[in-house]
Amino acid sequence: MAISIKELTSNEDSDWCPGCGDFGILLSVKNAMIAAQLDPHKTVIVSGIGCSSKLPHFINANGVHTLHGRAIPFAEGIKLANPELSVIVDSGDGDTYGIGAGHFVSAGRRNVDVKMFIHDNGVYSLTKGQASPTLPEGRKAKSMPTPNINGALNPLAIALMAGYTFVARTESYNVKEQTEIMAKALKHKGLALVDILQGCPTYNAAYTSANWFAQHTHKLPETFDGKVKNPKDTKEVNEKRMNALGVLLGETPDSMATGVFFDWENSDTFEERFMSRGIKPPSSQSIAGKDNASTIQLDAALDSISVKD
Amino acid sequence: MLSRRASSGMMVDINWMTGGKQGSGIDSALGLFARLMMKFGYNVFGYREYFSNIKGMHSFFTVRVSDKNISSIPSTVDIAVFFDKESVLGETNKRGEPIQDGHMKDVKPGGTLIVDTSVDRTKIGRNDINVVQVDFDRIIGAAATKLKLPSNNVSIAKNIICVAVSAFMMGFKLEDIDAAIKKEFAKKPVTVIDMDIAVADEAFGYITESGLKPVMKLESRAGSDLLYMEGFTAAAIGKAIAGCKMQVYYPITPATDESAFIESHPEFGMRVVQPESELAVIAMATGAAHAGFRVSTSTSGPGLSLMTETITYAGMCEIPVVVVDHQRGAPATGQPTRTEQGDLMFAVHQGHGDFGRMVVAPGSIEEYIEVVANAFNYAERYQLPVIVLGEKSVAQASSSMPRDYVQKFKSDYRVDRGKLSPTGGDTYKRFEFTEDNISPRVVMGGPGGVEWITGDEHDEYGHIDEDPNNRNRMMEKRNSKYDLIISELKKEEKYSITGDPKKADLLVVSWGGPCGAISEAVSGRKNIAFLRVKVIMPLDPDIAKIISSAKNSVCVEQNISGQLRQHIAATSGVLIRNQILKYNGRLMRYDEVSAALDEILKGKNKVVLNGY
C-alpha cells in the first residue's frame, strides 16, 4: 500500500520558527516512512519534550508525545508489548543525551528494534537557548550569558560502545541524505541511532545554519567501511566499530562527517531473546475467554508452592 | 510444661521462633518449618524480620501453628530454637550499643527454649521456662564425617536440626518428621539433598540417643490441599489472573521477590524486563499499557518516588497502568527490610497537579490476590493509574492458603477492559468528551485510525491545545471519574465491617497490614466494631458516615502521622477521635493491638506501639 506525503500529513499546524531545521527533518521522516513502506496505522512516533518533540503531532501516524527524557523507555515498552508496530523515537539532543542519557545508554544493552531520530542542535530551544549536551565547551549560543562551561559528549561514540547496531549522522537541511539514512535505519532490524545535526536559526544560527553545515560537514569517504558482513564474527564487528570510532575521534566540532558509521544487523534483538525463551509478546496472547473469564493456567505455579507430596 | 492435645478437640495455637546470622542457613528454616507444620495438617502464619544485609546480621523468624484460621502473630512464643549464642543472649556493636537484645525474653512463661550446649544456662536466667540444650556441632560433625566434608561446609544445614528438634519437642513422631522433611528435600536441587539428608539422619539419631522428651503433644492430622503463600506470591498470582503480560521492575527490597516469582513462572506469559531505573520502569510500563495491554510494575517507596512524573503523565493521558508499592520504612532509604504504611498520603497526592487516580490497599495475603487482580479492571474501566499499596508486613508474611481459594477466585474473576475496542475508525478521538468522562480506547495499530497523546493539555484528538474552555473541560473530565467509581464498585470491594459500629463502644478503623492483627485482637469482643478500608482513593463517603455514627473511634496505622485518618478528615471533615500507631518498622502483633485497644477504651487518645 503506497502512501503519499499528503496522507502522512496531519491536520495540525506546526509552530516551529521560520527556517527551523525541524521542517527538513519532518519531511525526511515522511519520505523515509514512504521509502520503507511503513503502514502509518502500525507506526508509532514517540517523542520527549522540546521543539523537536512536537513532530509526532504533524504526522498522520500514531503519536506518543511523552515527558522530558523518557521517550526511549516509552518506545521500548510499546515495541515489547506489540512487535508488529514500527516504533520511531523522534526527540531532541537535550532530551536524549542529557536528561534521558541513562535510557540512551541502556537501550544499547537490549537492542530493542526501535529507531531513534535525534534532533541535535546544541541548544535547549523551547526554554530559550541554553547549552545542550552536544554544545562544545567554550561555544556560546545566542542567548547564553557566558560561553559553555560544560564539555560536549559524542552520542555516536557512546552508541557504538553501548551496543547500538546502526549508528549514523546526517544534517537537517539535507533532505536527500536524511531520507536515505532514515530509510536505511527503518529497514534495519535492531536499535538504530540517527543523529541529525539540526539548524536552530533562533538560538544557534552561528553554528547550525545551512551555510555553516555546508562548510563544516562532509560525507564519510567512499572507502569508509562500517558495515558488518558476517554478523556472528565478533572480530569483524569490533573492527567495524573501531573504524567508526577512528573517524569520530579524528573529528573536531568544526569538521564532522555524515553517513552511516556502523551497521550490524544481527539476530539478537530483545524480541528474539524473549522469543527464544518462549515468552510471546502481550499482543499475541489472549487474556480472556468465554464470559471474559481469566485464561491463565495456574497449576504449575500453585504446584510450586503446594505442600502436597 | 505445656500440654496441648490436638486430637482431643482442644484448640492448637503454638508459636515458634528461630533466628541467627543472615547467610548462616537459618534463613530457610522458616519455610521448612512452616511447610512441615502444613504437611501435618495445620494452618500457619509466618513472618521474617531481617536486616538490610547479606551475611552476618541478625534475622529471626516466627511461625504460628494453629488448627483455626490465623492472620497474625503474637509477641511471645511457646517454643524457640537457636544454634548461635547471640540470638539467645543478644549482641552489641563496637560501641557497646545493643544490636538486638536476645530472644530469651520472647519465650512465654512455661515455654521451651532450645539452645546449643555451649550456651551458659545461668546467663539465660528465666527460671520460668524450660531450657533444652542440643549439641549442634556434634550432629554437624557426625554428618560431615559421613559426607567426608569439612564441618564448616555442613554447618549451613544447622537449620534442619532446628526444625527437626522443634517438631519432635512439639510431640510429632520422629518417623513422621523424617518422612516429611525428606519429601521437602526431594524438591531441592540434587546437589544439596545428600547433605540435608545426612544432617537430618544425624539429628534424628541424636534426638533418640539424648533422651529428649517432647513438651507438647501435637499430632499429625488430616489436612486440606494447602499452599504456602507469601504476600508477594499472591500479588504475582493476582497479576497472572488479571491477564497482565508484562512486568517491568527495578530491584528494590521488599518488592523484588514478586518479580522474581513471575520470572520463574514462564507459563504466566509475562515478559519480565529489568531496565536501568524506576524512571525507565514506569515509562516502559506506561508505554505498553497505552499500546493496549495489561502491564504492571512492582516497587517500594523510593521507586514510587522516582516514578512520580510519569504517573502524572498516565493521569494526564488516561493510561491504565497498575503500580504495586510494597511499602517499607521511609523516607529516603528508610528501613528497607522493615514495614511501614508511610506512603498513603504520597500515593493519594503523588505528582504535580490534579488528575484522576485510584489507590487501593490489600489488608491480607488473600486480598493481595483480589485487590491486585481487581486493580487491572479498575485501571482499564476508568482509564487511570492505579496504585496498589501493599507493605512488607504482608508481602513478606506467609500463610497457609487452601488451593481452592485461589482456584475459586480465578474462576469467579472477570476480565473487564472497559471501553476498549480493536479500532476507532478514521474519525477516532482518543480523548472524546463523553457523558461518563471515559473515552473509547483502542489497541494501537488496529486498522482504520491513528491516535495521538501528549502530556501537554490536549484537545479531543490528543493534540496540544491551550484554549481555556478546552482546558476546563479536560480538567473536569480527568478529575470527575470518582463518583462513577464509587457508584460502580461493590461495597465489599471498597471496605468491610465487622460488628455494629453504632452499638459498639469503639469503632476501629484501619487499612492494609494491621488488619490481620486487628481482626484477631477484636475477635470475640462484641463491644468493638472494625471497619477496614480497601479503596483509599476515591474514598467512599459512606466511610465517613459510619465513623460519625460510632460512639467512639480509633484509627490504627503503621505510620507516625496517621495518614488514613488525615485522608478521611481531608476528604470528609470527619476526624477519627483516637489513634494507635506503630512506626518502629516492626509488624503489629495482635496482643499489643489488643492491649492498646483496652487503653483506648479506658480513655487514652493515642497509643504508640513499640513491640519488636
Image (cartoon, helix red, strand yellow):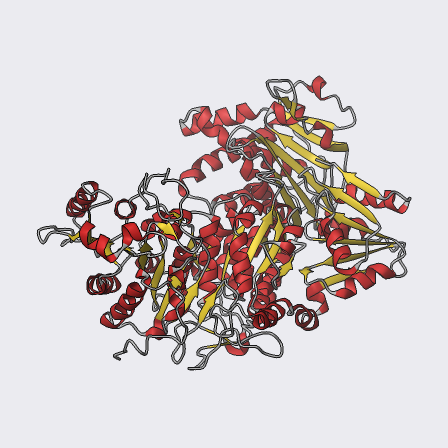
Asked if A261 appears above or below A178 in the picture, the reply is above
Residue B607: % across, % down: 81, 41
The foreground one among A25 and A297 is: A25
The foreground one among A116 and B602 is: A116
The foreground one among B348 and B361 is: B348
Residue B2: % across, % down: 77, 37
Looking at this rendering, what residue extends furthest in the left direction?
Answer: A223
Q: Is residue B154 visible in the rendered structure shown here? A: yes
Q: Quadrant of the C terminus of chain B?
A: top right
The foreground one among B399 and A122 is: A122
Give the quadrant of residue A177.
bottom left
Q: What number of labels is visible?
A: 0
**Viewed as shown, does residue B553 lie left or right of B334?**
right
**Viewed as shown, does residue A176 lie left or right of B587?**
left
**Viewed as shown, does residue B295 lie left or right of A221?**
right
Asked if B117 appears above or below A282 in the picture, the reply is above
User: In the image, what residue occupies the spot 70% across and 26% down?
Assistant: B131
Give the quadrant of residue A2.
bottom left
Residue B66: % across, % down: 70, 48
Q: Quadrant of the N terminus of chain B?
A: top right
User: In the image, what residue occupies the spot 21% across and 57% down?
Assistant: A265
User: In the image, what residue occupies the spot 12% across and 51% down?
Assistant: A225
Asked if A183 appears above or below B119 in the picture, the reply is below
Residue B43: % across, % down: 66, 51
Q: Is residue B8 visible in the rendered structure shown here? A: no
Give the quadrant of residue B589.
top right
